[in-house]
Image (cartoon, rainbow, N blue to C red):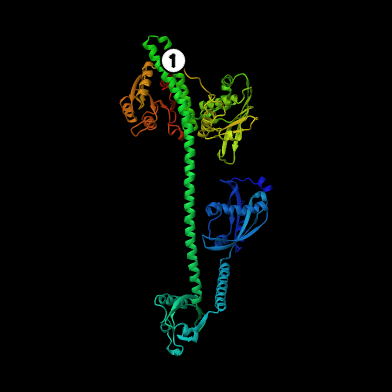
Amino acid sequence: MIWKNKLRFGKAPPTPARPSGYQALMDLVDDGFCIIQFTDGPDGPLSDYVHVESNSGYERHTGISGVVGKSVFDVSPQDGAEWVKIYRRVLETGEPIRFERRFAEVDRYIEVSATLAGKVEQGRVAVLFRDITERKRTEQALRDSEQRATRDARHLARALSAGAILGTWVWTLDTDHFELDTGFSTAMGLDPALPASSLTLETIVANVHPGDRPALMEEINRSTSGGAAIAFQFRVRQADGQYHWIETNGRLEGGSPRIFAGVLMDLDDRRAILEERDRATAELFQLNQTLEQRVADQTAKLMEQEEALRQAQKMEAVGQLTGGLAHDFNNLLTAIAGSLDLITSRLDEGRTDEAHRFVAAAQASTERAATLTQRLLAFSRRQSLQPAPTDVPALVHGMEDLVRRAIGPEVSVSTRFAPDTWPAMVDGNQLENALLNICLNARDAMPDGGLIEIEADNETVATATEHLETGAYVKLSVRDTGSGMSPDQLAKAFEPYFTTKPSGKGTGLGLSMVYGFARQSGGAALIRSQLGEGTTVELFLPRSAQAAEAATPAADAASAGEGSGATILVVDDEVLVRMVVAESLTDAGFKVLEAGTAREGLALLEAHPEISALLTDVGLPGGMTGRELARAAHEAHPQLPIIFMTGYDDEAHSGPALAGAEVLLKPFSFDVMVRRIVELTARA
């Protein structure tokens, strides 16, 4: 509409000065009157308004004083947004409105009329208030009276239609005189021949059951004093000596003299019906209770069977996983143990020149074991990640040569990136591993050659799905022209140790690692495929609010001057790990202090202020973790460089251990460890 495009206000413009008689003229209007000016508010354009003029009748009718210059949210904080919505309709449609509303603050009913005050573009609305409280109360009193009359008429009609009236009474309160018919006397167990002069209220209720008499007297007193109608059920002993249920209905008639009159109705038949209904209801309730119990028992049995099935499926999955792990690790341990035996044999024989070959074999098996462990941790979303703003196109460009060498010349690679691709908040090293795994899988699906297309685009998810929350993502897609997968294969593609490759041609952990890495990073991995039409793997990586930093080359250990005698504190509960780490650092020229627990490490930090860096495991015994040690060390020595060395961090998914700290994933290269320490101590 036109007004939506034209009306854009900030603060309300000042109201032009009015002639002195203008206010006096407005005050002559008995109704409340004000002019409001729409303004922009915290919720957007036209989300607030200010009262720019009012007359004295405004306060008289609404009970609100000093309104000029105030926002609607100053006057009515709770209902401000609703008032804005109501009056803004006048601007939207140009049509006047009229409605009634109760002002709870002053307990008044107000008739409100609103219309445009000038042109639409001026954003002003004139509002008139008229107090209609008395009219509303009169209308309500009339409705109440009509409801009482209707209720009494219905009650009498019900009694007449039931044919259960036993008798009537008329009690003149001013003279305390009773007129009872024969039916009333009989129903109340009285002698119909009793003279009217001997009748009193105590005499009349003498045969009422003692348990019901106090409540009946209270109802009679309430009705005769306040005018409320009486409708009360009670028991009374009649001529047969038995108690019978009856109901009394009556009311006080106004005027003079005051008359309290009514009827008695028989309840025995009705109560018999009600009792029969109650018995049937009780039986039905008992049946329902039994049925509910039967349903509950059956449901519990089904749940037990379902839980047993889930447990069996879980154990089957665990069996598949542990079987694959046992196979892979036993192979790796055999290679490592065999290499060590051969090294020992060659050293005993003095054939040291041949030992290097078996050392290399043991190291290669160790690296494969580390890769296997990291893939499992990635699948379970428990690997230690170091997310940072990452330029995804630059990362892919930097890997192109590696990818081409890995997949061979038979497969072509093409890339396409959106020119304004956002930076992603992701661990760059793990993203490289994931991309390489996807490309290797694509290569294996194209034994006769084909094409791999790598693309990066911006993607905004407006509606959450089972895979993705709403938000902004960088979508990295890898599409191949390979053999594709069947629906059954596609459903299991991300499961660990599931593979479509021949035996011995793959571990089945590549895609499961990709899936876990994407989920742990706050994104998702999706896969689409059809037999004969290739496969597309899509990684959704969360957008970074910060720009990606350009990569800087790592400093060479030799150029950094090696250890230079700096003191390093090494904390690890595993004695052999601590030994080889300390030995490597000592060989590099560092002085090393060792501790087996976090508390021992804190004590050494306090005793040796010359410590230049802390190298600690994350999982430590004694009630204090490596994370807690690092935080305590950082508080005492904010400039102290800290490196975590960990094989598995149970809290890795919850965030970084400490801002600025570095992480070495076990098993790591000791050359890399020494280089990191040299770099950190050189900068400190």
Q: From this viewpoint, is residue 227 visible?
A: no
Amino acid type, callout 1? Phe
14 over 229 or under it: above or below = above
Q: Residue at x 48, y 71 (%)?
A: 275
Which residue is tagged 1? 358
Provide residue 3's location: percent of width, then percent of height.
67, 48
User: Between 575 and 218, which is closer to the camera in this rendering?
Assistant: 575
Provide residue 344's location: percent of width, then percent of height.
38, 14
The crowding category of the residue bearing disc 1, from other C-alpha atoms within 10 Å (few below 14, some 14 to 19, many at least 20), is some
Q: From this viewpoint, is residue 582 visible?
A: yes
Provide residue 633's location: percent of width, then percent of height.
37, 29
Q: Is residue 46 left or right of residue 646?
A: right
| Residue 543 occupies quadrant | top right
Q: Secondary structure at mark 1?
A: helix
All told, the count of numbered labels is 1
User: Between 620 and 106, which is closer to the camera in this rendering?
Assistant: 620
| Residue 396 occupies quadrant | top right
660 over 401 or under it: above or below = below
User: Between 147 and 456, which is closer to the camera in this rendering?
Assistant: 456
| Residue 336 occupies quadrant | top left
Q: Is residue 612 left or right of residue 488?
A: left
Quadrant where the C terminus is found in the figure: top left
276 over 429 or under it: above or below = below
295 over 665 or under it: above or below = below
Provide residue 450's location: percent of width, then percent of height.
64, 23
User: Between 588 and 605, which is closer to the camera in this rendering?
Assistant: 588
